[in-house]
Amino acid sequence: RESDSSPVVGQTSKPQRRKENASHTASPNSGNLHHKEQLAMAEQDNAEPAQPTIREYMAKNVKTISVDATLKELSQSFTTQGVSALLVTDGDKYVGIVSDKRLAREGIAKGLNVDTTTVRAIMRSKMLTIESNQPVREAQAMMKANGVRHLVVTEAGKIVGIVTISDLIRYFTDFFEG
């Protein structure tokens, strides 16, 4: 599903992420319990535990790049913004996604001129999306099924963030260490 929203583009602040040692807040009734504690309580209550959602692990500040930026500018953006994927914009519309892996495989490895080739040449125009209220495990399943490391996160069809394989690693670390 692609977004028809007219988002604010060009945000460059660092993603607002949960502190590494902070507890999950999986549902309004779960308080500050780690996932293992939620499972134990659910067993006692014979109820299903609330599962952490994408919203708890996603980057909320969407980082973007223009469809007309060069591959050199793209590479510099990955470095300065500290991300592995950027949403591609054409004016005020999202038109695709591009990752550092795609730059390496579709741009550099194929010998494209980084000073003249634009992001348009290597971006993926089909953006895979997932709703922010979905369980984190749904993102894992989508990434595995589609062979991707980044998903665009939406709320009611509007782009609100991005979830990456690094975010999933953080979730599983919380789950097993919690």
Image: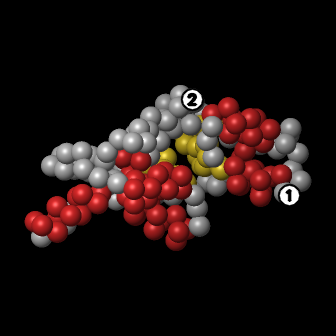
Q: Quadrant of residue 40?
A: bottom left
In the image: residue 98, left or right of residue 116? left
**Which quarter of the rendering shows the C terminus?**
bottom left
SS state under label 2: loop
Residue lying furthest front: 177
The residue to which callout 1 is attached is 110
In the image: residue 153, left or right of residue 50? right
Q: Amino acid at mark 2?
A: Thr
SS state under label 1: loop
Q: Residue at x 63, y 34 (%)?
A: 81
Q: Amino acid at mark 1?
A: Lys
Question: 10 Å neighbourhood of mark 2: few (<14), some, or many (≥20)?
Answer: some
The residue to which callout 2 is attached is 12
The nearer-to-camera label among 2 and 1 is 2
Measured from the top left, where is residue 46 in percent x and y?
12, 70
Is residue 78 among the parts visible in the rendering?
yes
Q: Which is nearer the eye, 99 or 28? A: 28
Q: Residue at x 65, y 49 (%)?
A: 98
